[in-house]
Image (cartoon, helix red, strand yellow):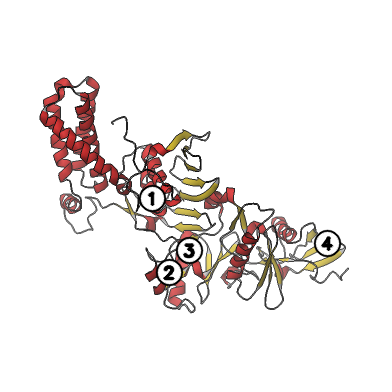
Amino acid sequence: MNDGKAKDNAVTPASKTKVANTEKLTDAEKKAIEDKVKAANPGAEVVVDDKGNATVIQDGNVSVIPSTDLVKVEDDANKPNGGNDANTPAAKTVVKDPANLTDEEKAKVKKAVEAVNPGSTVVVDDKGNATVTKGDGTVLNIPASDLVIPAEKLADEATNAKVKTPAVRTLVGDKENLTDAEKEAVKKTIEAVNPGATVVVDDKGNATVTMPDGSTATISKEQLVKDKEAVSKSKHGGDNLDIDLSKVEVADLANITPEEKAKFQFKVLGAITNVEEFDLDAYIKSTDKDGNTVYTSKDSKVKITIDKDGNMKVMKDGKINLAVNIDKAGNVTIVTKEGQVLAIPRDDAFKQRPSAQNNGGNGTSGNNGATNNEAKVDKAKLEGAIRQLDELIIKESAKFDAETAKKANKLSADAKKVFANADATQAEVDAMVKRIEDFMAKVASSTDHATPATAQAASNASQEAAKNARKAAKELPNTGTADSVAFMVAAAASAVLGIGLAVRRRKEDEED
């Protein structure tokens, strides 16, 4: 038994507990310290005094871990390690069985801890706990709960992760020696996705992030900075997600719709760059007990779950491959199958669509604003389609039943609204053209006495509809239907997962 004044027989947790008064800890603060020390010393009896010193009793040995190794105050957040003696990586490692890690999983945990604790020796046990021995001989413990996550709980990280990593890396001149301006730029990108956090960036671009509750994690430079060489070798800028992250235009930035969120999810999921169409028939649609829409591939290997807000997760072979959450404000969180929790602030994901009333403050009238917007959108095909539809209604209305006549008139009115709308996007215009073409084709096929002109128009419509269907996945028209959200997300997932599908979108059975 030691003298009770040394900590030689106890393991010190790497993460310190934030306290308000180091001379008089609250019961909650003492409990937090006790829990951390017990996690680092399984089976030990731990007693924490009012100043934060912890007495650890285990196997007949009594050790004391001094408060200086266990507590920190608010100002410590501005220190390089956030007041801790060792850094904890922000991203957790995904494991199959948290009670028995494989050698490969342990190697991944070790690499992640070493990345944020350069020069330290790291040993990871079978449960994912890491022992960090620093150059000065200090030994610290990072519990498995801070380092690993079971695969089945991966999607939960979208809301549970304490610290999020920016999806976009900061361009720097020398990754080994950042300038003050570059460090400040890195700091701002982290603060943007971790509101209220205190961020300290070192000369190499590693960042220690301390949240208001005192929890601290370190994001390694590999996930935060990039140089010109990295940019030149990448497709879309050398960021943590090497995909097109251009902004999606929305009608109301303060109230982003599920359909608009789905458009951005397409970009996150890789868009459909090599697949022209998507066969929705390849999935079996259902609704689970929570009211979420579920698409399951016919071989049951892939399941895509989409909630009422458009947030989704993709499972392949029973494992979560991806989760994309977009909150009410429009901030995006992406969880990759590797365990990275990446974040994109709303204003980097979405932008307000220009309106006739908002023409840059140049004093021009609303009509001029509309003209500027319309110049970017080709409505010629829509104008022709409306003319054809009106001619069809005039010439064939006597042959329509009441329901078809009602649909025809409503479609004509909807189309004219889109044509007159100065803020209509090209996708919305093209979607309306397709609706008209599909309707005319359906009417022609069900009308025995269609005129030659109508039959020809219907034939043209059918051909054009097929062409438009091949573009549907890329254009992402905002149809305003719940199924359009499911379709867009499911289609994107098919591309990311590498599902070799025959690519054809199912034609809608009903017209609006």
* Mark 4 nearby-residue class (10 Å; few <14, some 14–19, many ≥20): many
Whether residue 471 is visible here, answered yes or no, is yes
Give the SS element for disc 2: strand
In the image, residue 244 lies at what x, y percent? 36, 58
Give the SS element for disc 3: helix
Q: Which mark is residue 266?
A: 1
Q: CA distance from mark 2 to mark 4?
A: 48 Å
Judging by the rendered image, the residue that carries numbered circle 4 is: 57
Q: Amino acid at mark 2?
A: Thr
In the image, residue 129 lies at what x, y percent? 68, 61
Q: Which mark is first along the chain, 4 or 2? A: 4
Whether residue 75 is visible here, answered yes or no, is no
Q: Amino acid at mark 1?
A: Phe
Q: Which mark is residue 170?
A: 2
Q: Which mark is first along the chain, 3 or 2? A: 2
Give the SS element for disc 4: strand
Q: Amino acid at mark 3?
A: Glu
Residue placed most toward the observer, 193 or 101 = 101
